[in-house]
Image (tube, rainbow, N blue to C red):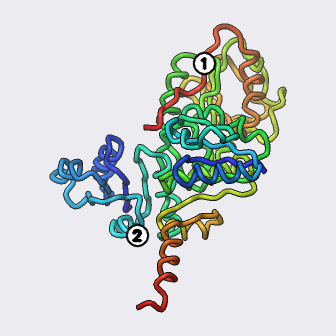
Amino acid sequence: MRVVILGCGKLGSRLAQRFSEAGHHIVIMDRDREPLKQLGPSFKGETLAGTAFIEANIQRIFEEKVDIFIAVTDKDNVNIMFTQWIKNKFNVPRVIARVYDPILAGIYRELDLETVCPTNLALETIQSMLKGKE
Amino acid sequence: MYIIVVRGGHVGYHLTKLLLSQGHEVMLIEKDKNKVAAMVDELGDSILPGDGSTIEVLTEAGANRADVIVAVTGHDEDNLVICQVSKVMFLRPRTIARVNNPVNEDTFWSLGVDSAVNATRLINAIIQEQVTAHDMLIPLLTMRGGDAEIVQTSLSPASPVVNKQIKDFVLPQGTLIISIYRGDELLIPRGDTRLLEDDQVIVLVRKVHEEVLKQILIGPVTGKKVDQTPPQVSKK
């Protein structure tokens, strides 16, 4: 599979490494160069840094078939905008946005955008950890 | 009308004042406390402190009875989300978004924002109009959905259609000459209307056919080449 990831934070970098180790072709992009360094020398995928550079290369990246696009920057609205744009413009079959705000995540799920809400996940986990311990 | 404006930068502040002076009811939402303090004496009840990209604050501003919601922050992603969320959560207000980076304009149209305003492209179009009125199609209005435009061009002596009747040349499918300005006179074109030098021709055209239309109305472009790519605006 060919996977494109936007945002190389704690989650983005780990996603890139895992997919890469599993033999998938990875392109990971971040507006800064610094976070891409945490991928380490063993990372085999392609990296893109800087907003202007990403913009200039986006056409080339998506010319070849992309199976999944995942947006995990630290800004909900950036993830929401990019996933919708990529889905529409390049017909990527699967796009996933990380959205911290549970209300926003719910609204966009209704609008047929696949979202992952870490707040809801943590909420459920903590609830189940505490179950029966009161 | 009741209009909500999100963020009081230069655009939001002056827009609010303009709308108020026209007798509209306006609420400007601004999250920077210092900016609110600077504007509150002048705007009084028409300013609300808070983050206008959140549903809570939009609700507090009365988004449910708003006729129009205008998002003019400096961040395109915020403007898009404000407009999309407003369409879902509130009673379908009309939404207008400022587009800071011209690259994003098509996205906004295709993602359900009613109107996308891109100052960079507008200014660029005006500059081009001054520089090369004869050489290009000047975009006047992008139709909803973004796949068609109303454009204007002025016919130079070299234009292949000068002194021809409209029925004598073939336009791309779905292209329509809406009107012609000859000096101050407005002509509604018919098949036997003859085009003359210096006519201002206004045409509805699909974007995919713009190049063909250019060849027909303007002819092969000669002389100096003008860079028509819009200047890039850096994000932040």
Whole-percent x, y for residue A99 in the image: 52, 61
Residue matched to label 1: B227
Q: Where residue B130 sits: x, y (%)?
A: 51, 19
Q: In this rendering, does residue A134 appear at all?
A: yes
Residue at 68% across / 38% down in the picture?
A46
Q: Residues within 10 Å of mark 2 (few under 14, many from 20)?
A: some
Q: Residue at x 52, y 83 (%)?
A: A128
Image side of residue B179 versus residue B235, left or right = right
In the image, B111 versus B124, the foreground residue is: B111
Q: Secondary structure at mark 1?
A: loop
Q: Does residue B66 sit above or below B204 in this rendering?
A: below
Foreground of the two, A12 or B228: A12
| Element type at mark 2 | helix
Q: Amino acid at mark 2?
A: Arg
Check disc 1 and give the amino acid type: Asp
- Report the chain holding disc 1: B
Question: Image quarter for residue B220?
Answer: top right
User: Vertically, is B44 above or below A134?
Assistant: above
Residue B165's place in the image compared with B148, above or below, is: above
Residue drawn at (70%, 40%) of the image: A44
Camera-near label (1 vs 2) is: 1
Q: CA distance from mark 1 to mark 2?
A: 45 Å
Q: Quadrant of the C terminus of chain B?
A: top left
Q: Position of residue B83 (x, y in %)?
A: 49, 57
Of mark 1 and mark 2, the one earlier in the sequence is 2
Task: Residue under label 2, please give it.
Answer: B65
